Image (spheres, grey):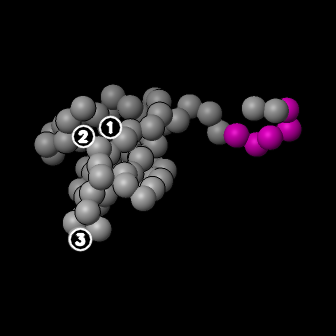
């Protein structure tokens, strides 16, 4: 990043494999709920055909464990 630009480093992006039809509800919520229960901060970005959830690198292993326990997998 150029000098003088404010940035917060250390985020890792997790991609939810899409595309998801617009009629499908709760996809992102089912991914975020286990993280919220473990108090893992996130930043979510949605695009036309998929979603990305960013977690801090220091929380990545806890996030993977929480997601795995609810049926989400890599």
Q: Which residue occupies 29% across, 68% down?
A: 22
Q: Could you give the CA–CA distance between mark 2 and mark 1, rounded to whole angstroms?
A: 5 Å
Q: What range of the chain is rendered magenta?
A: 3-7
- Residue matched to label 3: 23
Q: What element carries label 3?
A: loop
Residue 20's disc number: none
Q: Does the magenta stretch include residue 6?
A: yes
Q: Is mark 2 on a helix, strand or loop?
A: helix
Q: Could you give the CA–CA distance between mark 3 and mark 2, rounded to whole angstroms?
A: 26 Å
| Residue 50, above or below 5 | below
| Residue 69, above or below 50 | above
Q: Which quadrant is the N terminus positioned in?
A: top right
| Residue 34, above or below 59 | below
Which dot, 3 or 2, sits closer to the camera? 3
Q: Nearer the viewer, residue 28 or 35?
A: 28
Q: Does the magenta stretch include residue 17?
A: no
Which dot, 1 or 3, sits closer to the camera? 3
- Residue matched to label 2: 66
Q: Which quadrant is the C terminus positioned in?
A: top left
* Image location (x, y in percent) of residue 21: 26, 63
Q: Could you give the CA–CA distance between mark 1 and mark 3, rounded to whole angstroms?
A: 27 Å
The crowding category of the residue bearing disc 1, from other C-alpha atoms within 10 Å (few below 14, some 14 to 19, many at least 20), is many
Residue 19 visible in the picture: yes
Q: Which residue occupies 70% across, 40% down?
A: 7
Q: Which of 13 and 66 is in front in this view?
A: 13
- Residue matched to label 1: 63
Dot 1 or dot 3: first in sequence order is: 3
Disc 2 + disc 1, Cβ < 8 Å: yes
Dot 3 or dot 2: first in sequence order is: 3
């Amino acid at each position: 990043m150029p000098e003088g630009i404010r940035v917060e480093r250390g985020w890792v992006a997790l991609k939810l494999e899409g595309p998801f039809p617009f009629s499908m509800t709760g996809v992102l919520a089912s991914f975020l709920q286990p993280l919220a229960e473990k108090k893992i901060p996130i930043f979510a970005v949605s695009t036309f055909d998929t979603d990305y959830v960013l977690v801090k690198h220091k929380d990545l292993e806890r996030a993977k464990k929480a997601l795995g326990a609810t049926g989400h997998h890599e």
